[in-house]
Amino acid sequence: MLFDSIPFFAFFLVVYGIYLSLSHRAQNRLLLFASYCFYGLWDWRFLGLIIISTIVDYVCGIRIHDSHSDVIRKRYLLVSIATNLGILGGFKYFGFFSESLSSLLAGMGITLDALSFDLILPVGISFYTFQSLGYTIDIYRKQLKPCRNPLDFCLFIAFFPQLVAGPIERARRLIPQIQKQRYLQLNDIKTGTYLLFYGLFLKIFVADNMAPVVENVFGSAAPYSGSEVLVGLYAFSFQLLGDFAGYSLMAQGLARLMGFHLATNFRQPYFSKNIREFWTRWHVTLAAWFRDYVFRSIRDRLGERTQLNLSINFLITFGLIGFWHGASWTYVLWGLVTGLQIIIYVAILPFLQKVQFADHPYLGWAWTAGSMVVVYHSFCLGGILFRADSLAQSAQMFDALVSNFVITPTALKILRHIAIYCTLFVLLEWLHFRKNDILAVFRLSVPLRSVIYVSMFYSIIWFAKFDGDAFIYFQF
Amino acid sequence: MRSFTFSSSMPWGFCVAVVLVCCVELSMAQLPRGFWEAMLEASSPRIDDALRVRAKLETLDPGKPMVALLGSSQIREGVDTETLENALGGSYQVVNLGVSSGGVMETLQLLELVLKYNPSLVVVSAAPSQRFLSDMNVERLTHFSYTFLQSLYVPFRYGLAIKHDAWRSYFRSAVLFNTFPSVRIIRSYTLPARVPYLLGLKEPQQDEYSYAGLMPVAKMSKQVEKIRQTSINPGTDAQNAAARDLFAMLGGSNAKVLIVDFPINPVMRDKFHEFTDVLDYQKSLVKALSDENGLDYFARDNIPLFSDSEFYDVTHLNGLGRSKMTAFLAKISMHALNENRSRRANGT
């Protein structure tokens, strides 16, 4: 069930209605049952996978904590890692490795039929395995005590608002909320409702209206027009943010209605002033996960903190982030290119710090605006690799940007289309950015707030498909 | 037990927004369909169908005799033209000119067009939406004058009665469209699927016109413009006159004509007396007009029985129902064409 579908709203209304009338323990049991039903409705066959991951990490977490031997603790940690990454690797990456090996050997003149199992990718596998892994790693690092209530732990893994596409929650944040009684206030209902509707607005009005334009640009055959590729990338950037941020906001809103506070996953990333800041604003929970469990581990392994070691670390981490997104070389390349952008930024940072015009009223503003434009465009250019079907198509599109940049009427029409569907979104994002608060709308005057609510409401119902396009990040 | 406490602040912005929405919807509910269809030329579903009709007529094979189907969405969605062509031995090209929300005015206009192509057979659906009616409450059918309470009550009442596909096809869209009249107005021309065409990224193909699907980049012809202008609800007397003109034109043409009642979901017919009353009244009216002009009329009693499982809503047949109706039409069409051929052969 997609969040923007009628069956899901019916499901949630029923669950919510019962939830409000139950005691704390009963609420948790209801949520667990509802979460498994929700996941099972996607595909009941994959319930087994999530249950296996849950059981293994529950047991491993307790054993890691209770054991006094480092060897045994490490052993249980490896069991947890192997189980989770094994499930993830088996379902998500087996085909990729098999075909890549086959291609590599073919290049050397060795023919090998790629072994493929034609496996369906379980929805949300990349998210809940990482969430579960983070739990056992935190216990191993002695940053967390294990959750001894099995049902509470099951709910931590399977909590339906964030199960299939994040945010990737940390155990030390979500488990206490599960274990403690939740006191629902009007503010929670108000905030939850607003986040839910804002998320719906982003998904239905922004993302779904950008989708056909993006499909037309990326689905067409070469030769490409540079201007159309560029505006297609703009449309894709809004589609991606609208889709993913929309889902995350809906997840936050649904959880908030039940008294849970989920982590913020997007913080107006397109207003970032540098690439490093971008990754503190874009898919925050994933970036934080890789920072804490991959980057810092590699940093500790590499030892000396030289520029070279730092660069290697960035490349590995972001290469893995790219790989996390999909079993394809385009994703890996996208990750590596992003890593390279950060390496370059870190290298020129001393120079940038000398040049900034923070104290100058106009130049400072221009510098900030210019930085935002550069960062946004560098993300958009990376979007070619992210969205293109193949490396060959990516190369053709890059080539078009450089060698065939002519402003066509179609490009102008696409730009107009983007302006129509994304202006309100950009204005709201700017407001959230300036106030550093996703709920900044609540502090506006009543008339202005009402106009925003009405605009979002009509945007949703006028453009709702309700059985429409799936969320992009469900494929990850 | 759970604790449920409230803070003292009222969500004033939300309350004002609800009031604004109610005001907008109640205002838009007062607009008669003719008003906004005339204003928003790109929004009328009839534009889609009119363009489709034009496209179909322009691509006719001049050497092959034609069977024309006229009427509303009931015939448009209720007949499989390819199956019908095959059932007629492949000797005829079947052109389905049914128009969504089509009434007697549209049928009259399209008949004028179609007769220029000398069809061998014309089949006209006699559906309630054809509005062959005189003193029925036409206002309620053709005007968006629903109040909120009525628009909430009506789809619930009907939707709960229909078991088959009720949620997906009727219940959901009826609640949305009737509770929010603005949705109906805006959605008809702002569907995201139309975007590539509006942007000029795709060119519509000849057969790529449909009410439920895409609106092409409109190239309005004078004929289409004329159809659009006259399809606005003209009022009861004008409709009566148009119905008489239609039957007179059908009777005076060289084509063999069949007037066929298309079925209504029996659940609706049996549970809601207003449907039965309407259908009975229409039957007597259509029979009188048919007899007056010497046309064959297949009333409800003379068509196959349909069950709820053969409909996807109140009036439209699903795939199962479509197959059944097409088979029936094939039978009576073949009989009518054979009869016409032998009459001509005998010089009568």
Image (cartoon, coloured by chain):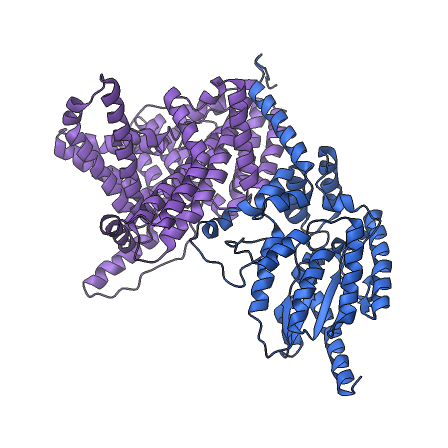
Residue appearing at x 55%, y 32% in the figure: A457
Q: Hey, which quadrant is residue A378 in on the image?
A: top left
- Chain B: colour as depicted: blue
Residue A183 seen in the current view: no
x, y percent for residue A320: 28, 41
Residue with the most extreme front position? B222
Query: As drawn, is B85 to the left or to the right of A328?
Result: right
Which chain is rendered purple in the image?
A: A
How many discs mark residues in the rendered view? 0
Position of B133 with respect to A409 (left or right) is right
Left or right of A438, for residue A65: left
Q: At 54% from the left edge and 20% from the top edge, which residue is drawn? A: A447
x, y percentage for residue A308? 13, 34
Locate residue A153, reporting x and y percent: 46, 30
Q: Quadrant of residue B91?
A: bottom right
- A407 or A223, which is in the foreground? A407
Q: Is residue A196 visible?
A: yes
In this picture, is A357 found above or below A60? above
Residue extending farthest to the bottom is B346
Q: Residue at x 27, y 44 (%)?
A: A334
Q: Is residue A19 above or below residue B212?
A: above
Q: Identify the image quadrant of the N terminus of chain B.
A: top right
Q: Is residue A197 above or below residue A441?
A: below
Please give left or right for residue B146 compared with residue A229 in the image: right
Residue sitting nearer the eye, A338 or B342: B342
Front residue of A426/A73: it is A426
Q: Quadrant of the C terminus of chain B?
A: bottom right
Q: Measured from the top left, where is residue A115 in percent x and y?
A: 33, 60
